[in-house]
Image (tube, rainbow, N blue to C red):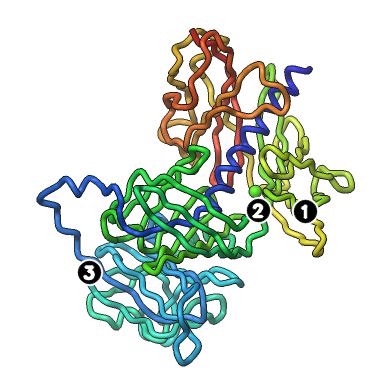
Amino acid sequence: MKRQRQEKKRGFLSISYLLIVLMIAAFTACGGGGSGDGGSSNNNPNPTPAPATGTISGSVSGTIIVAVNDNGDIVASDDTTGKTADSNGNFPFTLTGIPTGVNIRVYLITSTGVYPMYFDSNNDGTADTNVFSLSSAAAIDLGYVAITNQQAIPTTNPITTQGVSAGAENTNTPNYLVSGTFYTSSGTYTYTNGILSANTTSTNTICNTTGVENYTVTTLTATTMIMVDSNADTLTWTRPSGTDGDPVGTWTMTIFNYLWVAKINADGTFTVSENFKCVKADSLHTQFQGTDYYSAWVSVNDPTQQFTPVTVEGQYISGSLSLTYNSSEGYWEGSIFLGPTPPTNLPLTYTFTLNSNTGTITMTDDIEAFVVPLATNLSPSGGQTVSATPTFTWTGTGSGTGSGYTYMVSVFESNCTSPCYGIWNSNLLTTTSVGYSGPALTSSGAYFYDVLIIDAYGNASIAEESFVVQ
Ligand SMILES: [Ca+2]
Ligand SMILES: [Ca+2]
Protein backbone atom coordinates (compact mmCIF):
# COMPACT_ATOMS: atom_id res chain seq x y z
CA MET A 1 0.00 0.00 0.00
CA LYS A 2 2.80 2.36 0.83
CA ARG A 3 4.46 1.60 -2.47
CA GLN A 4 1.24 2.32 -4.27
CA ARG A 5 0.94 5.72 -2.69
CA GLN A 6 4.53 6.48 -3.51
CA GLU A 7 3.99 5.61 -7.13
CA LYS A 8 0.95 7.75 -7.39
CA LYS A 9 2.69 10.60 -5.64
CA ARG A 10 5.59 10.50 -8.02
CA GLY A 11 3.17 10.67 -10.86
CA PHE A 12 1.59 13.77 -9.50
CA LEU A 13 4.97 15.35 -9.19
CA SER A 14 5.77 14.45 -12.75
CA ILE A 15 2.78 16.24 -14.03
CA SER A 16 3.41 19.13 -11.72
CA TYR A 17 6.83 19.47 -13.21
CA LEU A 18 5.19 19.51 -16.60
CA LEU A 19 3.04 22.34 -15.35
CA ILE A 20 6.14 24.15 -14.29
CA VAL A 21 7.45 23.80 -17.81
CA LEU A 22 4.35 25.61 -18.90
CA MET A 23 4.56 28.17 -16.15
CA ILE A 24 8.09 28.98 -17.17
CA ALA A 25 6.98 29.27 -20.74
CA ALA A 26 4.46 31.78 -19.52
CA PHE A 27 7.30 33.88 -18.18
CA THR A 28 9.09 33.78 -21.47
CA ALA A 29 9.48 37.31 -22.46
CA CYS A 30 11.98 37.26 -25.14
CA GLY A 31 14.66 39.73 -25.77
CA GLY A 32 16.53 40.97 -28.69
CA GLY A 33 19.39 43.06 -29.82
CA GLY A 34 21.26 41.39 -32.48
CA SER A 35 24.39 39.39 -31.99
CA GLY A 36 22.93 35.97 -32.43
CA ASP A 37 24.58 32.75 -33.21
CA GLY A 38 22.73 32.49 -36.43
CA GLY A 39 21.28 29.54 -38.23
CA SER A 40 22.52 27.16 -40.82
CA SER A 41 21.78 29.56 -43.64
CA ASN A 42 24.72 31.66 -42.46
CA ASN A 43 26.90 28.87 -43.71
CA ASN A 44 25.20 28.58 -47.05
CA PRO A 45 26.75 30.83 -49.71
CA ASN A 46 23.85 30.24 -52.08
CA PRO A 47 20.66 30.27 -50.04
CA THR A 48 17.48 29.25 -51.81
CA PRO A 49 15.34 32.34 -52.41
CA ALA A 50 12.35 32.47 -50.11
CA PRO A 51 9.08 31.69 -51.89
CA ALA A 52 6.84 34.65 -52.64
CA THR A 53 4.56 35.49 -49.73
CA GLY A 54 1.71 37.92 -49.27
CA THR A 55 0.67 40.28 -46.53
CA ILE A 56 -2.62 41.00 -44.81
CA SER A 57 -3.14 44.33 -43.10
CA GLY A 58 -5.97 46.29 -41.56
CA SER A 59 -7.02 47.82 -38.29
CA VAL A 60 -8.89 46.56 -35.24
CA SER A 61 -10.09 47.93 -31.96
CA GLY A 62 -7.39 46.04 -30.06
CA THR A 63 -6.57 42.38 -30.27
CA ILE A 64 -4.27 39.55 -31.24
CA ILE A 65 -4.59 38.55 -34.90
CA VAL A 66 -3.44 35.17 -36.17
CA ALA A 67 -3.50 33.56 -39.61
CA VAL A 68 -3.54 29.75 -39.68
CA ASN A 69 -3.35 27.09 -42.38
CA ASP A 70 -5.51 23.96 -42.81
CA ASN A 71 -3.53 22.15 -40.12
CA GLY A 72 -4.19 24.94 -37.65
CA ASP A 73 -0.53 25.91 -37.71
CA ILE A 74 0.03 29.63 -37.23
CA VAL A 75 1.54 31.15 -40.36
CA ALA A 76 1.56 34.75 -39.13
CA SER A 77 0.44 36.79 -36.16
CA ASP A 78 0.34 40.28 -34.77
CA ASP A 79 -0.60 41.85 -31.46
CA THR A 80 -1.76 45.43 -31.12
CA THR A 81 -0.52 45.69 -27.52
CA GLY A 82 1.72 48.72 -27.25
CA LYS A 83 0.80 50.10 -30.67
CA THR A 84 -0.40 53.65 -31.23
CA ALA A 85 -4.05 54.07 -32.14
CA ASP A 86 -5.05 55.88 -35.32
CA SER A 87 -7.35 58.92 -35.36
CA ASN A 88 -10.36 56.62 -35.07
CA GLY A 89 -8.95 54.93 -31.99
CA ASN A 90 -8.15 51.74 -33.91
CA PHE A 91 -4.87 49.87 -34.05
CA PRO A 92 -3.08 48.83 -37.25
CA PHE A 93 -1.96 45.24 -37.76
CA THR A 94 0.13 43.50 -40.41
CA LEU A 95 0.47 39.78 -41.03
CA THR A 96 3.54 39.14 -43.13
CA GLY A 97 4.85 36.02 -44.83
CA ILE A 98 1.44 34.62 -45.77
CA PRO A 99 2.24 31.57 -47.94
CA THR A 100 0.71 31.28 -51.39
CA GLY A 101 -1.31 28.28 -52.54
CA VAL A 102 -2.44 27.54 -48.99
CA ASN A 103 -5.87 27.83 -47.38
CA ILE A 104 -5.76 30.63 -44.81
CA ARG A 105 -8.07 31.47 -41.92
CA VAL A 106 -7.71 34.64 -39.84
CA TYR A 107 -8.83 34.92 -36.21
CA LEU A 108 -9.19 37.97 -33.98
CA ILE A 109 -8.69 37.30 -30.29
CA THR A 110 -10.02 39.88 -27.86
CA SER A 111 -10.76 39.94 -24.17
CA THR A 112 -14.28 38.75 -24.97
CA GLY A 113 -13.56 35.83 -27.26
CA VAL A 114 -12.08 34.38 -30.43
CA TYR A 115 -13.65 35.53 -33.69
CA PRO A 116 -13.08 33.96 -37.12
CA MET A 117 -12.87 36.43 -39.99
CA TYR A 118 -15.74 35.86 -42.44
CA PHE A 119 -16.40 37.45 -45.83
CA ASP A 120 -18.86 37.20 -48.71
CA SER A 121 -17.63 34.76 -51.37
CA ASN A 122 -20.56 35.00 -53.81
CA ASN A 123 -21.49 38.65 -53.61
CA ASP A 124 -24.96 38.06 -52.18
CA GLY A 125 -24.39 40.43 -49.30
CA THR A 126 -23.93 37.73 -46.67
CA ALA A 127 -20.59 36.63 -45.24
CA ASP A 128 -20.42 32.88 -45.80
CA THR A 129 -16.84 31.64 -45.53
CA ASN A 130 -13.68 32.17 -43.49
CA VAL A 131 -11.21 30.54 -45.91
CA PHE A 132 -9.20 32.16 -48.66
CA SER A 133 -5.95 31.58 -50.49
CA LEU A 134 -3.37 33.62 -52.38
CA SER A 135 -2.29 32.52 -55.84
CA SER A 136 0.46 35.14 -55.85
CA ALA A 137 2.23 37.48 -53.46
CA ALA A 138 -0.81 39.65 -52.91
CA ALA A 139 -1.07 42.50 -50.42
CA ILE A 140 -4.51 42.39 -48.84
CA ASP A 141 -5.79 45.46 -47.00
CA LEU A 142 -8.89 44.53 -45.02
CA GLY A 143 -9.51 48.02 -43.66
CA TYR A 144 -11.20 48.11 -40.27
CA VAL A 145 -12.27 44.68 -39.05
CA ALA A 146 -15.37 44.79 -36.88
CA ILE A 147 -16.78 42.07 -34.64
CA THR A 148 -20.40 41.38 -35.50
CA ASN A 149 -22.50 38.39 -34.47
CA GLN A 150 -19.46 36.47 -33.21
CA GLN A 151 -17.63 36.99 -36.50
CA ALA A 152 -14.86 39.36 -37.54
CA ILE A 153 -16.06 41.21 -40.63
CA PRO A 154 -13.56 43.26 -42.68
CA THR A 155 -14.52 46.52 -44.31
CA THR A 156 -12.84 45.36 -47.53
CA ASN A 157 -13.60 41.85 -48.77
CA PRO A 158 -10.24 40.06 -49.23
CA ILE A 159 -11.28 38.46 -52.53
CA THR A 160 -11.53 41.86 -54.15
CA THR A 161 -7.71 41.81 -54.15
CA GLN A 162 -6.24 40.30 -57.30
CA GLY A 163 -4.78 36.86 -56.71
CA VAL A 164 -7.03 36.09 -53.73
CA SER A 165 -9.80 33.50 -53.94
CA ALA A 166 -12.35 32.11 -51.51
CA GLY A 167 -12.34 28.56 -50.18
CA ALA A 168 -14.96 26.43 -48.44
CA GLU A 169 -15.90 27.44 -44.90
CA ASN A 170 -13.92 25.73 -42.12
CA THR A 171 -15.67 25.89 -38.76
CA ASN A 172 -12.90 24.22 -36.78
CA THR A 173 -11.15 26.47 -34.30
CA PRO A 174 -7.61 25.44 -33.34
CA ASN A 175 -7.44 24.06 -29.79
CA TYR A 176 -5.03 26.71 -28.60
CA LEU A 177 -7.53 29.44 -29.46
CA VAL A 178 -10.45 27.94 -27.56
CA SER A 179 -9.57 29.81 -24.40
CA GLY A 180 -10.11 33.43 -25.39
CA THR A 181 -8.84 34.99 -22.17
CA PHE A 182 -5.41 36.43 -22.85
CA TYR A 183 -3.01 37.97 -20.38
CA THR A 184 -0.15 40.31 -21.17
CA SER A 185 3.30 40.77 -19.72
CA SER A 186 5.69 43.48 -20.86
CA GLY A 187 9.10 44.89 -20.14
CA THR A 188 12.55 45.41 -21.58
CA TYR A 189 15.20 43.04 -22.83
CA THR A 190 18.77 42.69 -23.93
CA TYR A 191 20.17 40.10 -26.29
CA THR A 192 23.92 39.60 -25.96
CA ASN A 193 26.13 36.62 -26.75
CA GLY A 194 23.16 34.35 -27.23
CA ILE A 195 21.61 35.24 -23.85
CA LEU A 196 18.20 36.80 -23.97
CA SER A 197 17.65 38.60 -20.70
CA ALA A 198 14.06 39.71 -20.21
CA ASN A 199 13.06 42.10 -17.44
CA THR A 200 9.31 41.86 -16.96
CA THR A 201 8.09 45.16 -15.51
CA SER A 202 4.35 44.66 -15.84
CA THR A 203 2.04 41.66 -15.96
CA ASN A 204 -1.65 41.06 -15.40
CA THR A 205 -1.48 37.30 -15.11
CA ILE A 206 -2.06 36.02 -11.61
CA CYS A 207 0.86 33.61 -11.84
CA ASN A 208 3.67 35.62 -13.36
CA THR A 209 5.96 37.87 -11.42
CA THR A 210 8.03 40.84 -12.45
CA GLY A 211 11.81 40.62 -12.62
CA VAL A 212 14.61 39.30 -14.78
CA GLU A 213 14.65 35.90 -16.51
CA ASN A 214 17.55 34.74 -18.66
CA TYR A 215 17.22 32.41 -21.63
CA THR A 216 20.00 30.78 -23.63
CA VAL A 217 19.15 31.04 -27.31
CA THR A 218 20.53 27.99 -29.08
CA THR A 219 19.00 28.62 -32.51
CA LEU A 220 17.90 31.89 -34.10
CA THR A 221 17.04 31.74 -37.77
CA ALA A 222 14.67 33.75 -39.93
CA THR A 223 11.78 31.57 -38.77
CA THR A 224 12.77 29.67 -35.60
CA MET A 225 14.06 30.65 -32.17
CA ILE A 226 14.91 27.90 -29.70
CA MET A 227 15.72 28.92 -26.15
CA VAL A 228 16.60 27.02 -23.01
CA ASP A 229 15.55 28.34 -19.64
CA SER A 230 17.24 27.95 -16.28
CA ASN A 231 15.49 24.61 -15.72
CA ALA A 232 16.90 23.27 -19.00
CA ASP A 233 13.45 23.32 -20.57
CA THR A 234 13.41 24.06 -24.27
CA LEU A 235 11.00 26.57 -25.75
CA THR A 236 10.56 26.75 -29.51
CA TRP A 237 9.15 29.91 -31.10
CA THR A 238 8.34 30.49 -34.74
CA ARG A 239 7.74 33.50 -36.97
CA PRO A 240 6.85 33.68 -40.66
CA SER A 241 9.99 35.58 -41.60
CA GLY A 242 12.73 37.72 -40.15
CA THR A 243 16.45 38.33 -40.05
CA ASP A 244 18.79 35.47 -39.25
CA GLY A 245 20.37 36.11 -35.85
CA ASP A 246 18.03 38.98 -34.96
CA PRO A 247 15.20 38.27 -32.52
CA VAL A 248 13.19 41.39 -33.40
CA GLY A 249 9.80 40.27 -34.67
CA THR A 250 6.52 38.66 -33.67
CA TRP A 251 6.87 35.07 -32.46
CA THR A 252 4.31 32.45 -31.58
CA MET A 253 4.49 29.25 -29.57
CA THR A 254 1.78 26.71 -28.84
CA ILE A 255 2.00 24.14 -26.06
CA PHE A 256 -0.98 21.86 -25.56
CA ASN A 257 -4.05 24.03 -25.59
CA TYR A 258 -2.31 27.35 -25.19
CA LEU A 259 -0.88 30.10 -27.35
CA TRP A 260 1.87 32.58 -26.63
CA VAL A 261 2.54 35.60 -28.85
CA ALA A 262 5.80 37.40 -28.13
CA LYS A 263 6.57 40.72 -29.77
CA ILE A 264 10.23 41.64 -29.58
CA ASN A 265 10.60 45.24 -30.58
CA ALA A 266 13.60 47.04 -32.03
CA ASP A 267 13.41 49.67 -29.26
CA GLY A 268 14.35 47.13 -26.57
CA THR A 269 10.83 46.49 -25.30
CA PHE A 270 8.74 43.34 -25.49
CA THR A 271 5.22 42.11 -24.85
CA VAL A 272 4.03 38.55 -24.36
CA SER A 273 0.33 37.70 -24.66
CA GLU A 274 -0.79 34.24 -23.58
CA ASN A 275 -3.95 32.35 -22.77
CA PHE A 276 -2.29 29.92 -20.40
CA LYS A 277 -4.34 29.47 -17.27
CA CYS A 278 -2.55 29.76 -13.98
CA VAL A 279 -5.07 27.41 -12.43
CA LYS A 280 -5.18 23.88 -13.77
CA ALA A 281 -7.34 20.82 -13.34
CA ASP A 282 -5.90 17.90 -15.29
CA SER A 283 -6.64 14.20 -15.27
CA LEU A 284 -4.11 11.49 -14.46
CA HIS A 285 -4.32 7.79 -15.15
CA THR A 286 -1.98 5.38 -13.40
CA GLN A 287 -1.99 1.63 -12.88
CA PHE A 288 -0.70 -0.45 -10.00
CA GLN A 289 -0.72 -4.25 -9.94
CA GLY A 290 -3.25 -4.34 -12.75
CA THR A 291 -5.67 -1.86 -11.20
CA ASP A 292 -6.37 1.48 -12.85
CA TYR A 293 -6.51 4.72 -10.89
CA TYR A 294 -7.98 7.88 -12.34
CA SER A 295 -7.56 11.14 -10.51
CA ALA A 296 -7.71 14.90 -10.93
CA TRP A 297 -4.66 16.99 -10.18
CA VAL A 298 -5.45 20.60 -9.35
CA SER A 299 -2.87 23.35 -9.04
CA VAL A 300 -2.44 27.09 -8.86
CA ASN A 301 0.87 28.64 -9.81
CA ASP A 302 1.80 31.17 -7.15
CA PRO A 303 5.59 31.65 -6.98
CA THR A 304 5.43 34.45 -4.41
CA GLN A 305 2.62 32.85 -2.36
CA GLN A 306 0.48 35.91 -2.76
CA PHE A 307 -2.64 33.84 -2.07
CA THR A 308 -3.77 31.97 1.03
CA PRO A 309 -5.83 29.97 1.45
CA VAL A 310 -6.58 28.41 -1.93
CA THR A 311 -9.61 26.13 -2.17
CA VAL A 312 -11.26 24.13 -4.96
CA GLU A 313 -14.82 22.94 -5.44
CA GLY A 314 -16.09 20.52 -8.05
CA GLN A 315 -17.13 16.97 -8.87
CA TYR A 316 -15.88 14.22 -6.53
CA ILE A 317 -15.04 16.82 -3.87
CA SER A 318 -17.21 16.84 -0.77
CA GLY A 319 -17.55 20.48 0.17
CA SER A 320 -14.30 22.14 -0.78
CA LEU A 321 -10.71 20.95 -1.00
CA SER A 322 -8.03 23.11 0.62
CA LEU A 323 -4.84 23.01 -1.48
CA THR A 324 -1.35 22.57 -0.03
CA TYR A 325 1.43 25.01 -0.85
CA ASN A 326 4.50 23.41 -2.38
CA SER A 327 7.22 25.89 -1.49
CA SER A 328 9.92 24.08 -3.48
CA GLU A 329 7.98 24.44 -6.71
CA GLY A 330 5.99 27.57 -5.93
CA TYR A 331 2.44 26.35 -6.45
CA TRP A 332 -0.62 25.09 -4.66
CA GLU A 333 -1.67 21.51 -5.35
CA GLY A 334 -4.13 18.81 -4.49
CA SER A 335 -5.50 15.59 -5.92
CA ILE A 336 -8.95 14.04 -6.14
CA PHE A 337 -9.48 10.30 -6.62
CA LEU A 338 -12.06 9.67 -9.33
CA GLY A 339 -12.23 5.86 -9.45
CA PRO A 340 -10.94 2.83 -11.38
CA THR A 341 -12.69 3.91 -14.58
CA PRO A 342 -12.83 7.41 -16.09
CA PRO A 343 -15.92 9.46 -15.27
CA THR A 344 -18.20 9.85 -18.28
CA ASN A 345 -19.96 13.09 -17.33
CA LEU A 346 -17.40 15.32 -19.01
CA PRO A 347 -16.26 17.96 -18.73
CA LEU A 348 -15.53 18.04 -15.03
CA THR A 349 -15.36 21.66 -13.95
CA TYR A 350 -13.33 22.82 -10.97
CA THR A 351 -13.71 26.25 -9.39
CA PHE A 352 -10.70 27.73 -7.64
CA THR A 353 -11.02 30.39 -4.93
CA LEU A 354 -7.82 32.37 -4.36
CA ASN A 355 -7.84 34.56 -1.29
CA SER A 356 -5.37 37.36 -0.68
CA ASN A 357 -5.04 40.61 1.24
CA THR A 358 -6.44 42.48 -1.73
CA GLY A 359 -9.50 40.32 -2.27
CA THR A 360 -10.70 37.06 -3.73
CA ILE A 361 -10.22 35.76 -7.27
CA THR A 362 -12.36 32.96 -8.68
CA MET A 363 -11.18 30.98 -11.73
CA THR A 364 -12.21 27.68 -13.29
CA ASP A 365 -10.59 24.94 -15.31
CA ASP A 366 -12.09 21.84 -16.90
CA ILE A 367 -11.06 18.24 -17.29
CA GLU A 368 -12.13 17.57 -20.86
CA ALA A 369 -10.77 14.05 -21.31
CA PHE A 370 -8.89 11.11 -19.85
CA VAL A 371 -5.87 9.40 -21.33
CA VAL A 372 -6.79 5.71 -21.25
CA PRO A 373 -3.79 4.11 -23.01
CA LEU A 374 -0.65 3.55 -20.99
CA ALA A 375 2.82 3.26 -22.48
CA THR A 376 3.89 -0.42 -22.44
CA ASN A 377 7.06 -2.46 -22.97
CA LEU A 378 9.16 0.11 -21.14
CA SER A 379 12.89 -0.46 -21.40
CA PRO A 380 14.92 -0.53 -19.20
CA SER A 381 12.67 -2.25 -16.69
CA GLY A 382 12.59 -4.19 -13.44
CA GLY A 383 15.71 -2.61 -11.97
CA GLN A 384 17.79 -3.57 -15.00
CA THR A 385 21.42 -2.40 -14.97
CA VAL A 386 22.16 0.20 -17.63
CA SER A 387 24.85 2.70 -18.60
CA ALA A 388 24.96 6.18 -17.09
CA THR A 389 23.35 7.56 -20.25
CA PRO A 390 20.48 5.15 -20.84
CA THR A 391 18.08 5.29 -23.77
CA PHE A 392 14.44 4.88 -22.78
CA THR A 393 12.13 3.08 -25.19
CA TRP A 394 8.45 2.11 -25.00
CA THR A 395 5.44 1.16 -27.06
CA GLY A 396 3.03 4.04 -27.48
CA THR A 397 -0.37 4.42 -28.99
CA GLY A 398 0.30 3.21 -32.51
CA SER A 399 1.92 4.85 -35.47
CA GLY A 400 2.91 8.37 -34.64
CA THR A 401 1.17 9.63 -31.56
CA GLY A 402 -2.43 9.82 -32.77
CA SER A 403 -5.15 11.89 -31.15
CA GLY A 404 -2.78 14.74 -30.41
CA TYR A 405 -0.80 12.68 -27.92
CA THR A 406 2.80 13.42 -27.05
CA TYR A 407 5.17 11.61 -24.71
CA MET A 408 7.42 12.74 -21.90
CA VAL A 409 9.92 10.87 -19.74
CA SER A 410 10.68 11.86 -16.14
CA VAL A 411 13.48 10.32 -14.05
CA PHE A 412 13.48 10.11 -10.23
CA GLU A 413 15.93 8.91 -7.63
CA SER A 414 14.44 5.81 -6.00
CA ASN A 415 15.57 6.78 -2.51
CA CYS A 416 14.25 10.31 -2.62
CA THR A 417 12.02 11.22 0.24
CA SER A 418 8.65 12.82 -0.07
CA PRO A 419 8.21 15.21 -1.71
CA CYS A 420 10.12 13.50 -4.47
CA TYR A 421 11.09 15.67 -7.44
CA GLY A 422 12.18 14.51 -10.82
CA ILE A 423 15.85 14.98 -11.65
CA TRP A 424 15.26 15.15 -15.38
CA ASN A 425 12.37 15.55 -17.81
CA SER A 426 12.52 15.06 -21.54
CA ASN A 427 10.91 17.55 -23.84
CA LEU A 428 7.52 16.67 -25.29
CA LEU A 429 8.18 13.87 -27.77
CA THR A 430 6.49 12.33 -30.78
CA THR A 431 9.03 9.50 -30.83
CA THR A 432 8.92 6.35 -28.67
CA SER A 433 12.50 6.59 -27.50
CA VAL A 434 14.70 9.24 -25.96
CA GLY A 435 18.24 9.33 -24.62
CA TYR A 436 18.88 10.53 -21.09
CA SER A 437 20.54 13.96 -21.08
CA GLY A 438 20.10 15.15 -17.51
CA PRO A 439 22.50 15.53 -14.59
CA ALA A 440 25.05 12.71 -14.23
CA LEU A 441 23.46 9.56 -12.84
CA THR A 442 25.20 8.12 -9.80
CA SER A 443 27.16 4.95 -10.22
CA SER A 444 25.29 2.11 -8.54
CA GLY A 445 22.36 4.47 -8.14
CA ALA A 446 18.78 3.20 -8.35
CA TYR A 447 16.18 5.17 -10.27
CA PHE A 448 12.56 5.18 -11.30
CA TYR A 449 11.23 6.75 -14.44
CA ASP A 450 7.80 7.56 -15.78
CA VAL A 451 6.64 7.53 -19.39
CA LEU A 452 3.72 9.91 -19.75
CA ILE A 453 1.22 9.98 -22.60
CA ILE A 454 -0.14 13.53 -22.67
CA ASP A 455 -3.16 14.78 -24.57
CA ALA A 456 -3.72 18.17 -26.15
CA TYR A 457 -5.16 19.54 -22.90
CA GLY A 458 -2.30 18.41 -20.65
CA ASN A 459 -4.08 15.33 -19.25
CA ALA A 460 -1.79 12.34 -18.88
CA SER A 461 -1.36 8.65 -18.25
CA ILE A 462 1.73 7.46 -16.43
CA ALA A 463 3.60 4.15 -16.71
CA GLU A 464 6.55 3.58 -14.42
CA GLU A 465 9.66 1.39 -14.42
CA SER A 466 13.01 1.24 -12.64
CA PHE A 467 16.70 0.81 -13.48
CA VAL A 468 20.11 0.75 -11.82
CA VAL A 469 23.24 2.46 -13.15
CA GLN A 470 26.42 0.38 -13.43
CA1 LIG B 1 -22.36 35.20 -49.49
CA1 LIG C 1 -7.61 21.14 -17.75
Circle 1: element type:
loop
Circle 3: element type:
loop
Percent coordinates x, y for residue 407 in the rendering: 50, 34
Which one is nearer the viewer's eye here, 265 or 433? Answer: 265
Is tag 2's residue or tag 3's residue first in the polypeptide sequence?
3
| Residue carrying label 3 | 135
- Residue farthest to the right, as pictured: 319
Question: Which disc is residue 307 wearing?
Answer: 1
Residue located 69% across and 20% down the image = 288
User: Which is in the foreground here, disc 1 or disc 3?
Assistant: 1
| Residue carrying label 2 | 278
Tell me the distance, in whole angstroms, between the alpha carbons under discs 1 and 3: 54 Å
**Dots 2 and 3: beta carbons under 8 Å?**
no
Q: Amino acid at mark 2?
A: Cys
Q: Amino acid at mark 3?
A: Ser
Give neighbour class at mark 2: few <14, some 14-19, many 20+ (Cα, 10 Å).
many
Residue located 57% across and 22% down the image = 449
**On the image, which quarter does residue 161 sit in?**
bottom left
